[in-house]
Image (spheres, grey):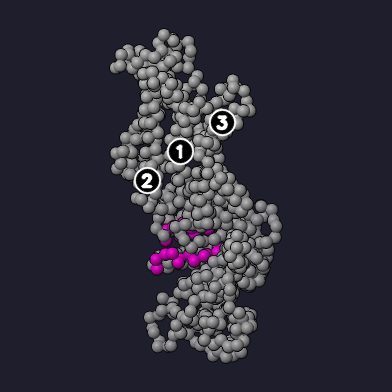
Amino acid sequence: MADAVTTTSGPLVRLKGLKRYFDVSPPLLARVIERKPRAIVQAVDGIDIEIARGETFSLVGESGCGKSTVARLVVGLYGPTEGSVEFDGMDMQERRSAAEMSVIRRRMQMIFQDPFASLNPRWRVFDIIAEPIRAFGLANSTDEIRDRVNELLAQVRLTAADGSKYPHEFSGGQRQRISIARALASKPEFLVCDEPTSALDVSVQAQILNLMMDLQREFGLTYLFISHNLAVVYHISTRVGVMYLGRLVEVADTQSLFRRPRHPYTRMLLDTIPDLEMTGRQRAPVAGEVPSPINPPSGCAFHPRCPHANERCKVERPNLSSLDGGSVACHAVEEGRLPMEERTYAAG
Amino acid sequence: MSLRDRIGRAADSDIWFSFKASPVTMVAAGLTAFIFLAALLAPLLAVQNPYDPASLNLSDAMKPPVFFGGDWSFPLGSDDQGRDLYSTILYGTRMSLFVGLCCVVVAMVIGITLGLVSGYVGGAVEAVIMRIADVQLTFPAILIALLIDGVVRGIISVKRHDEIAGFVIIVSISLSLWVQYARTVRGSVLVERNKEYVQAARVIGLSRWLIMIRHVLPNVMGPVMVIATINLGVAIITEATLSFLGVGLPATQPSLGTLIRIGNEYLNSGEWWITIFPGITLAALVLAVNMLGDWLRDALNPKLR
């Protein structure tokens, strides 16, 4: 890294008790006249994550479980309702001067889900990629900017000539690579990837993932990877956190999570992955839907769908507790009611 | 990118294709270009300068057009002050176009600014701006223009008013037209600001204003250009109406509307040409501009393509 960076020994990113609620109440008039209640979506309801340098931490979960909200909280697109986001030991919530904030911002960037919405349609690719370079003042002359943009284009396997085109002239995969080039432009250490492959064809997904892994190796990047696709997560992650209704239910390194899932929800998710060698093992069908985050179930949020739920699960909210290497939030696991299950999982 | 590339790109675009596919639009565009050029080159094309009293002769007053007993020195006849109608129409069109364009530009600047602000800032600011817009929409544009003009007349003297009549009329028409721009821009901003490219700019840490001007504004300009084109016709008509009612431009600097008003007084005594020719010019101009605007609206609407 070119700049002198105050590197502490702790994790690069630490989320502490992170909460984000959204007020989705009907307008005041409707509340007064029709006596509708206030409505608060508890999108993220208390999350603790530590992401070490150089690792890829994945968040998985069904739609609406709050994983994208976590991504936006981390890069500062949303402010947390409670809790904190620490980047390299610095609390993002602290008031700082614009210059200091810009120094932190340069070190973290984001790749978005929809490659058709994440590039300004009126801008040429060159200007899109050059924007962070100009905004952070990372180059002194036009020549320097041009060289840097061409270098970035080459890094994402595009040509310098592509810089003079508009985004609509590219395919989804190419656009996503332009997005990656823009994210890399400020030489960040940490990239938040919000479902970067979910809008792409399967063949292109692999291409993007491999590119991201190559870049990680080359630049020592740290990823927070948001996805609902378990095959993709298995491919790219070092550690995985499973989210359900705004809370983490299980965190473990990738191998143990896929081999020995602890939480009933994790097991249910893994059962949904189709594989070639149908082992004849009984699969639990995914029952029900994610409950409304406006009015989450009492106790363990998963209990209405959980085959192992008992009275305690309906009343008491389980906390994440460490269990050889990983951590699980489940009463059944804690009490030893849930037998260990071994899975064979081979991606692809 | 070279100029040739740009021309090639433009010739290949959907808009150019839709332009070529519509003969009506091509006629309208030709007519608009012709009127604009004629207005622009008025000093070269006119046979006399109608603004210069020294070149006028009262004995030339009320001459009929050339094929109705007149002669070639006054091809479209002359008015009550001996002004050649052909020259006066050229200068009048110029005045009408100038006022119309100024109104559109001023209204556009006001409307875009307020629309951007209310769309991006939201909250109380948005509520106040949009409620003012809603209230203003309940009044006809011409009434608002008359109101503003009346207030200004009450404040300043008649002589002074003649000097700044053009300015007053531009302000009053602009203030009656900004609402459309503001509402359209606000709507587009609400859509655009949640798109991921705006969030990407926020992650970089650009300020709100930079994001609005660099990212959002270029993406909301499409509908704005359509409104601007259609509004040019509206502004010209409004100015003509105000001038016809006698609260617009003074007779010493006639616009098409002023000419029609002057001619209207002589219509019953047989001098029809004084009002008919400016009327035809005004109708042709507004029709051509409106047809261009209609076409532009359809061409830029992807759902109709």
Residue drawn 60% across and 84% down?
Answer: A314
Disc 3 marks a residue whose amino acid type is Asp
Question: Residue A168 at what x, y percent from top left?
Answer: 41, 53
What residue did someone put label 3 on? B149
**Could you tell me if the residues under marks 2 and 3 are in contact, i.e. CB atoms within 8 Å?**
no
Q: Is residue A54 visible?
A: no
Question: Residue A75 at what x, y percent from top left?
Answer: 59, 61
Q: The C terminus of chain A appears in which quarter of the rendering?
A: bottom left
What residue did someone put label 1 on? B231
Looking at marks 1 and 3 on the same chain, the residue that comes earlier in the sequence is marked by 3
Q: Residues within 10 Å of mark 1 (few under 14, many from 20)?
A: many
| Residue A189 shown in magenta | yes
Q: The N terminus of chain A appears in which quarter of the rendering?
A: bottom right
Disc 2 versus disc 3: distance between alpha carbons?
A: 37 Å
Name the mark on residue B299.
2
Question: Residue B30 at what x, y percent from top left?
Answer: 34, 32
Disc 2 marks a residue whose amino acid type is Ala
Chain letter behind tag 2: B
* Front residue of A50 and B202: B202
Range of residues picked out in magenta: A173-202
Q: Residue farthest to the right? A: A95
Q: Quadrant of residue B55?
A: top left
Q: Quadrant of residue A283?
A: bottom left
Q: Secondary structure at mark 3?
A: helix
